[in-house]
Amino acid sequence: MDSNSFSKIEIVEIVVMVRLDLYNRNLPHGANAILQEMESMSVRPLPSPRSVNRILDRHGLTHRRTGHYL
């Protein structure tokens, strides 16, 4: 496993962390924005947009009332 390869549990934690960080900075924080940020962090393997949405849903982070989704 190389230094940028993460376990499934770590990927979930990164998705949640990035989502909250983007939201707190009042930036777009939908699945595509999260994936762009993870790409810039060289996170591997990148989950699919659908997987990101499932992770967000499981953690109660998809309440559309927050806005700025891309």
Image: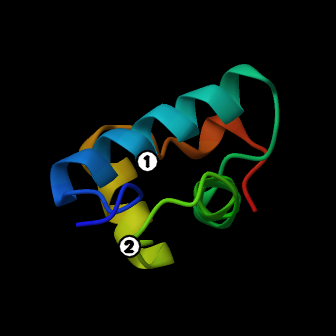
Helix, strand or loop at label 1? It is helix
Number of labels in the image equals: 2
When asked about the image quadrant of residue 50, the answer is bottom left
Measure how far apart labels 2 and 1 are at the Cα level. 12 Å
- Give the quarter of the figure containing the N terminus: bottom left
User: Which amino acid type is marked by label 2?
Assistant: Pro
Residue 3: x %, y % from top left: 37, 55
- The residue positioned 44% from the left and 79% from the top of the image is 48
Q: Which of disc 1 and disc 2 is earlier in sequence?
A: 1
> Which of 1 and 42 lies nearest the eye of the viewer?
1
At horizontal 32% and vertical 64% (from top left) the residue drawn is 2
Is 19 on the left or on the right of 67, as rendered? Answer: left
The C terminus, quarter of image? bottom right
Relative side of 69 to 44, left or right: right
At horizontal 35% and vertical 71% (from top left) the residue drawn is 51
Q: What amino acid is labelled 1 in the image?
A: Val
Residue 11 placement, left or right of 48: left
Q: Where is residue 47 in the image (x, y as percent from the top left)?
A: 40, 72
Question: Of the residues tagged 2 and 1, which is closer to the observer?
Answer: 2
Q: Name the residue under label 1.
A: 15
Front position in the image: 46 or 59: 46
Name the residue beneath numbered marker 2: 45
* Residue visible at 78% across and 23% down in the picture: 25
Locate residue 30, reporting x and y percent.
64, 55
Residue nearest the observer in this picture, 2 or 69: 2
